[in-house]
Image: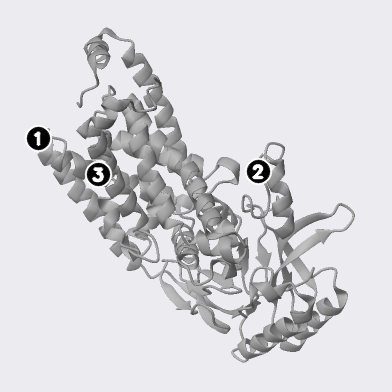
Amino acid sequence: MKPWIPDLKQRLDPRHWRGFLLASVSGTALALLFPEVGWWPLAFVALVPLMMAVEGQPPPRAFRFGFWSGFLYFAGSLSWLEYTLEHFGHLPEPVAWSLICLLAFYLALYPALCCFLMAKSRLSSWPYELKFAVFWVAMEGIRGTALTGFPWNLLGYGVGDSLLLVQLADIGGVYGLSFYLVIVNGLLFKVFFSGKRDFFRHRALLALLLLAAGFGYGVMRLSETPPTRSFRLALVQHNPLQEEKWNPRYRDTLMESLYGLSRRAAEKEPDLLVWPEAATPFWFRHYRSYRSRVAELVHELGIPLLLGSPDKDRPTARRTNSAFLLDRSGEIVGRYDKMKLVPFGEYVPLRRLLFFVQKMVELGGSFSAGDTPTVFRTEKARFSVAICFESLFGELIADFVDRGAEFLVVLTNDSWFGETAGAAQHLSFVRFRAVETRRPIAQAAQSGYSAVFDGRGRLLRKTDLGEAAVIVQELHLSLEQRKTWYVEFGDWVVYLAWLSALVLAVVSRLGAGTGESGKNRRGAAAGWTPT
């Protein structure tokens, strides 16, 4: 029988069921880190039970424990997808949950591989907590890259409600926070549960020092007061019903809502007016009558307008999810095409293999990715735009800042989330982009949460779910425009983790072939025992 499938003897082994119980505790704790629960202090101990389960286990069993923990982690934190699949995908509840389980199955492979590699590298002399952090972040980095990437609910995002700890993101981004948290988990595991007390004192001291350094760094960064200048930004959230938005019968009503809210915002004389992702229920460049009315409104108000709209190149039929900047006269002076598309929402990865999925995606729109990072310029400031899913990619946002953006805007349509945790989770990622770049960032949503964060990640304003509203907020743009370590070097923590994981794999392979490991090999032949 294959070692990946436990035989009867293994199933009756108490260590087998103890491991699954511990993995269940970790998976549940990880799921509880994220909105709407948001129990962020669990981030310091959430992995400890999984580490207890995996310690000293053979690779196949470690893989199973990691997989089960990851499955609970993602099935729990992404359970809000059930609303989206039922309400907009018109799928029966059992089918919706089946698809959620399928997604969780895929995502669970990453923590499973982390645990597998930990078991394979047990002969390495590297500190336990360092190895676990390297493999965990290496797997998160692959998850955030493969098939466009799906870096939703990375471990580092779990401390999003701790404004002090989030400040660490300007050094290593969200992956750096993941690394930090795994190190703390590993130290606590070794201190209290490893059964080896030789290094108790120095590991306990190191854990305390790391915690003090993390919170202390946050205090220091939040106390800084760099010189700034003001820029007034207005966000319009018109809260249309997704079911009505693309129905021509409601087109005029929706546009009148945008016009009315824009006039209300203009009373406070903003420097820039922002409409959300796909705000216009038509192809903005190609519907001349409606485009003329928008241009007339902008000319009337005398305020530049940034708006989201789908776009289509008629000769090639290439469709993009785009943002357009109109100057005070109503002329288009800038454009950005979304570069990071939603897998299975805006495009189908591995299209030749998954040809049967393509037909379903085409019902909502099969889009092409843009390839040009854009920095928009108004009379008073330079800024860049991320559209919806792109707010998950810190390195993309950092590139905008590296090119000169003084603040950032996220255009999104979170109607798909309804009043579930999805909208809150999506907004929580935006805070990290503000801290990573030390630039103010605003999210303009059709429905969901529109909000403004300053360059330290502090929430300045936020709308409620399900309301039509306007936010006018003064942004404080730094006069120094310094670049953070993260802006300079991007996801360097991930690259270092990949390199370290490769080194560990080579070292473990070489170690397995030395006489020094002969005793371990003989022990493995008789039956794997904990170290």
Q: Image point 34% across, 20% down: which residue?
A: 508
* Front residue of this view, candidates 99 and 518: 99
The amino acid beneath tag 2 is Pro
Closer to the N terminus: mark 1 or mark 3?
3
Residue at x 29% of width, y 23% of height: 124
Secondary element under disc 2, as helix, strand or loop, is loop
Which residue does the image show at 33% across and 25% down from the upper left?
7
| Amino acid bearing label 1 | Arg
Q: Name the residue under label 3.
A: 49
Residue named by callout 2: 349
**Measured from the top left, where is residue 235 in percent x and y?**
59, 78
The answer to whether the residue labelled 2 contacts the one labelled 1, judged by CB atoms less than 8 Å apart, is no
Q: Mark 1 or mark 3, which is nearer to you?
A: 3
Between marks 1 and 3, how big is the CA–CA gap?
Answer: 19 Å
Residue under circle 1?
A: 197
Q: Give residue 135's quadrant in the image.
A: top left
